[in-house]
Image (spheres, rainbow, N blue to C red):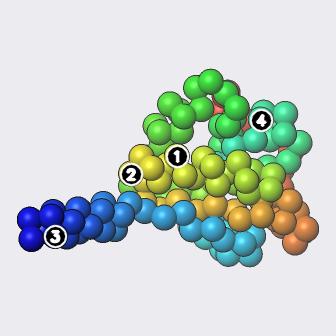
Amino acid sequence: MKNLFFAIVAITCMFFVNAQQGTIKNVNSTEFKKLTTKNDSTLLDVHTLYEFESGHLKEADQLNYYAWSFKKNLLLLPKNKPIYIYCRTGYISKRAAKILIKNGYKNVFNLENGIKEWEQNNYPTEKGSSTSSN
């Protein structure tokens, strides 16, 4: 009976911990475009600086996923604002989004198939330098 009680308590605790964690919202480029027009959010490109300069979304900040300081800088983003994150194919940005969720961020949106799908839909991109230096 005592073991049953502890099992129920353990399961209940796991449920509440999982319920408090956010989940990554993977969205296609059409939905991402609609969502990123809202103010008071963070739009983040996790490409290298070279990749970013060859094409990125307007108003995006750049944070190189492969930089030593990536995780430290990523976790400086405000937790109270939605974060829209993308890369070339959606794979690296999904990994970055998992780091955010694991660290208590709740409103994390990943461009599921990356900027590649965005460009296939002829949505606008910009070329040039970053507002960030990582």
| Residue identified by numbered label 4 | 48
Q: Amino acid at mark 4?
A: Thr
Q: Are marks 4 and 3 in contact (CB under 8 Å)?
A: no
Q: Amino acid at mark 3?
A: Leu
Q: Which mark is residue 104?
A: 2
Q: Which mark is residue 4?
A: 3
Labels 2, 4: front one: 2
In space, the residues marked 2 and 4 are separated at their CA atoms by 25 Å
Labels 1, 4: front one: 1
| Residue identified by numbered label 1 | 99
| Element at label 4 | loop
| Element at label 1 | helix
In space, the residues marked 1 and 4 are separated at their CA atoms by 18 Å
In space, the residues marked 2 and 3 are separated at their CA atoms by 31 Å
In space, the residues marked 4 and 3 are separated at their CA atoms by 52 Å
The quadrant holding residue 131 is top right
Q: Pointer 1: residues within 10 angstroms few (<14), some, or many (20+)?
A: some
In this rendering, position of residue 30 left or right of residue 15: right
In space, the residues marked 1 and 2 are separated at their CA atoms by 9 Å
**Labels 1 and 2: the sequence-earlier one:** 1
Quadrant location, the N terminus = bottom left
